Image (cartoon, helix red, strand yellow):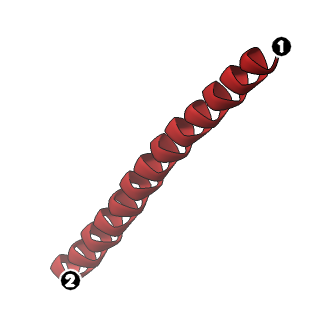
Amino acid sequence: MGGWHSLVKGGVYMVTYEAMNMLFQFGMFLAAMATVIVAMIALFINRKK
């Protein structure tokens, strides 16, 4: 019983870790996209002047 409980706990921990890893990668992707968009807008504004 204790082994099964620890196994389930480990599984939940693994799922949480995977989800956090995915969220972290998604956040990094969003940050990169935002940086590119801001840079493009800055270049566009500078070129417009």
Task: From the viewer's side, name the closer residue of 12 and 40.
Answer: 40
- Which residue was labeled with disc 1? 49
Q: Is residue 5 left or right of residue 42?
A: left
* Residue 4: assigned label: 2
Is 41 above or below relative to 33? above
Task: From the viewer's side, name the closer residue of 17 and 44.
Answer: 44
Mark 2 secondary-structure assignment: helix
Q: Earlier in the sequence, mark 1 or mark 2?
A: 2
Q: Could you tell me residue 19's position as x and y percent?
A: 41, 62
Q: Could you tell me residue 30's position as x and y percent?
A: 55, 45
Q: Could you tell me residue 21's position as x and y percent?
A: 37, 52
Q: Dividing the picture into quarters, in which one does residue 8 lie?
A: bottom left
Mark 1 secondary-structure assignment: loop
The residue depicted at 58 percent of the width and 31 percent of the height is: 35
Q: Is residue 2 left or right of residue 40?
A: left
Is 8 above or below relative to 33? below
Q: Dividing the picture into quarters, in which one does residue 1 lie?
A: bottom left
Q: Is residue 7 left or right of residue 27?
A: left
